[in-house]
Image (cartoon, grey):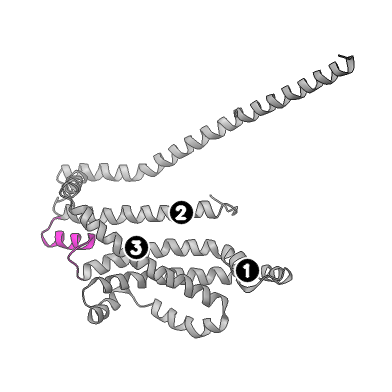
Amino acid sequence: MSQTDTVIGSGAGTGQSRIQKKRIEDQVPTLQEVRTKTQRRESKWQLVVRGAILPVTVLAVWQICGSMGIVSKTLLPTPFEIWLAFYDLLVSGQLFTHLEISIWRAAVGFLIGGSLGLMLGTAVGLFRKFEQSVDPSVQMLRTIPHLAITPLFILWFGFGEFSKVLLIAKGAFFPLYVQTFLGIRNVDSKLFDVARVLEFSRFKQITKLVLPAALPNVLLGLRLSIGVAWLGLVVAEIMGSSEGIGYLIMDARQFSQTSVVFVGILIFAFVGKGSDSLVRFLEKKLLKWRDNFNG
């Protein structure tokens, strides 16, 4: 073997060793990455602790006042009594039965109202003549309260499921309609000039330009629609129902079972918060490109 071959071989071996070393360095996390992950874990725990301070304090004061007899247990049962009522409903199976029906009503009503609101808001936002024809009537209907239109729904559709789902759909329709319309109209007009230069078709303008730019408003409308759908569910089940969380609350009120009333209220609160958190999770995933002020 010549001296030249030896040099070339040693150079190749050195190059391979450098590549292997580089791969190992890429696989092993740096000290800064470890610190960043640790800080993220600590920040999550800090958020949990900060969020728990107020409710834990309120529950502790509430329990102490109830145990000392400062507040009547008929009017304001202690958290421990509410927990016992929740456990009884859970063991008996009543809670799951009523909750399943309520979630079904809210989901169907939201899907109907939200879908119509999204489609109509998109059409009104894209076409000015359509806005001039439809938007004044929709805005007039938007100002009618749930409780004002409930008797009319009862007269027209009775106490069946259709009237309840329709009332929920009415509430879920308007937030998505308004926010979709605003999101489309807030799109920068310069982007449409760019789309004309690139010779985008109308469909491509909607899918590649309008909807992505309006997505923050659409997701905000989604959050608001879910909240209003739960409010509509309460009104729908209280106005006349034999099943559901709203019925559970009204039935407990008639027998002065205040702890069961609180259980129903807390169920609405936790399920509503869970659905809202789901939409916020979607916001974080779909709107990663935004660089907003976070406080």
Residue at (63%, 69%) from the top-left corner? 205
Residue 243 within the segment the image draws in magenta: yes
Say which amino acid is labelled 2: Arg
Left or right? Give the position of 44 relative to 109: right
Residue at (25%, 79%) from the top-left corner? 157
- Please rate how many residues cluster around mark 1, counting C-alpha atoms within 10 Å: few if below 14, some from 14 to 19, many from 20: few
Quadrant location of the N terminus in the rendered image: top right
Residue at (25%, 56%) from the top-left corner? 99
Would you name the residue on which mark 2 appears? 280
Choose between 20 and 233: the one closer to the eye.
20
Question: What secondary structure is found at the residue carrying circle 1?
Answer: helix
Left or right? Give the position of 84 relative to 140: left
Would you name the residue on which mark 3 appears? 107
Question: Who comes first in sequence, dot 2 or dot 3?
Answer: 3
Q: Residue 124 placed where, x, y %?
A: 52, 77
Would you name the residue on which mark 1 appears? 204
Question: Who comes first in sequence, dot 1 or dot 3?
Answer: 3
Q: CA distance from mark 1 to mark 3?
A: 31 Å
Question: What secondary structure is found at the residue carrying circle 3?
Answer: helix
Question: Who comes first in sequence, dot 1 or dot 2?
Answer: 1
Residue 234 within the segment the image draws in magenta: no
Depth check, mark 2 against mark 3: the one in front is 3
Q: CA distance from mark 1 to mark 2?
A: 27 Å
Occupied quadrant, residue 165: bottom left
Left or right? Give the position of 259 relative to 295: left
Q: Residue 189 placed where, x, y %?
A: 66, 71
Q: Where 142 falls versus 264 (above or below)?
A: below
Q: Are marks 1 and 2 in contact (CB under 8 Å)?
A: no
Per the rendered image, the range of residues in magenta is: 240-257
Say which amino acid is labelled 1: Lys
